[in-house]
Amino acid sequence: MRNARIVGALRSLEESVLSRQGMGLPLLAIAVVSVTDLAAGRDHYIGPGMVVAPALASITTTWLRTLLVAALGLASQVLLAPYNGVVEIHDWVLLTGQFTTYLVVSLFSAYIAWRRETGQRAFSAITSVAEAAQRALLRPPGDRVGDVRLAVRYVSAADAAQIGGDLYSVLDTPHGVRALIGDVRGKGLDAVQTAAVVLGAFREAAYDEGGLTRVAQRVEASVQRHVGTGEFTTALFVEFDGPGSVDLLHYGHVAPLRVAADGTVTTLDPPDPWVPLGLGALVKGVPAAWQAPLCGTDVLVLCTDGVIEARSAQDGSFYPLADRVGALVAGLAQNLETAVERVYADLLRHAGGSLGDDVVLLLLAPAAPTPLPPTA
């Protein structure tokens, strides 16, 4: 009967706080040690094993709750003491050492939990600032810009910063919808600064200049003026200025893919490949834009090299975007959010759940015409 009362009291204590965040594992440890002690009989005292409970709490919950777990563990040992005959033991040095050890471990566990909480708060603050900086830099568009539908996934490999050197922008301009996707050499704050220069120049030139070549020349001039020598940015410029086609301009970037409604994938290789932005002084002339067919049921898939260079967790192979994107995107020209989510999920599966480089997936498609209201 006494055993049943002890077990019942322990269960009541556990159930009263089991819903608290992160308390499940340390409370389970208390219950396991208590039940094991009871099952082992009076000749075996397993109470000292209760020290595992506050240690577990230090990595699963707050420092205050860690102290609560420590108190519950101590209470459990006190409840178990009569059953094990501990109160009859006259070796008080042994008992004092046991409880002193438990107290020290409990206080140290609370300190570890406090340090972990402090680090998490600092990390959250850094992440919040970085996310705000990312939004200010990239200015994520809605699901439609002008007469173009779009969906995007941006993922930075710099987890703490949440921002990297990949960039994109989609703008509705007097010259049509214009888009840019790019990848800055390197990472960190220098890459972010270069991305800011490229995006700032593009946002100005896209509204002012006629023709993608002139837009790109303005961006190139800004990069050479404001970015250090030897730094460069691969880029692809896109312009939707009429139905049935799209204009493209290549600056060393990953070639875009066109996915038809039936899943047929066409790689739009540039007839005039060019060096990345920032290296224009090394070559003569300027690149020429080219035009590719793009009907209302097609999807234009743009990405950075973090997508096609994502390695399989099993065999180390690169992600075969051109081979897989057709089945993932086919027929979704007017539902690009679903399409980009399917491609990104497939990319993560290929990479084993984590990516080693910044990634931008940008899907563009001509928007279906808005139906006219019925006439009276």
Image (tube, rainbow, N blue to C red):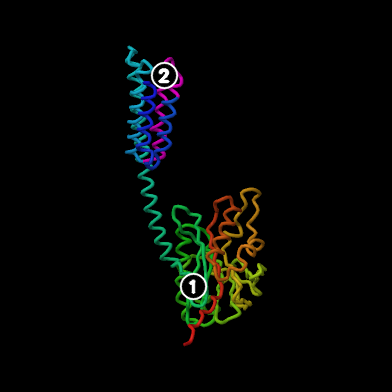
Crowding at label 1, few (<14), some or many (≥20) Cα neighbours within 10 Å?
Answer: some
> Which mark sits nearer the N-terminus, 2 or 1?
2
Check disc 1 and report the residue beneath it.
144
Where residue 136 appears, x then y in whole percent?
41, 65
Say what secondary structure mark 2 lies in.
loop
Q: Is residue 230 visible?
A: no
Q: Is residue 55 visible?
A: yes
- The quarter of the picture where the N terminus appears is top left
Residue bounds of the magenta highlight: 36-61
What secondary structure prevails in the magenta region? helix
Q: Is residue 243 above or below residue 151?
A: below
Q: What separation in Å lies between label 2 and label 1 (alpha carbons)?
A: 69 Å
Q: Residue at x 58, y 59 (%)?
A: 307
Viewer-side residue, 215 vs 143 = 143
> Is residue 45 one of those drawn in magenta?
yes
Image position, residue 189 (x, y; %): 45, 59
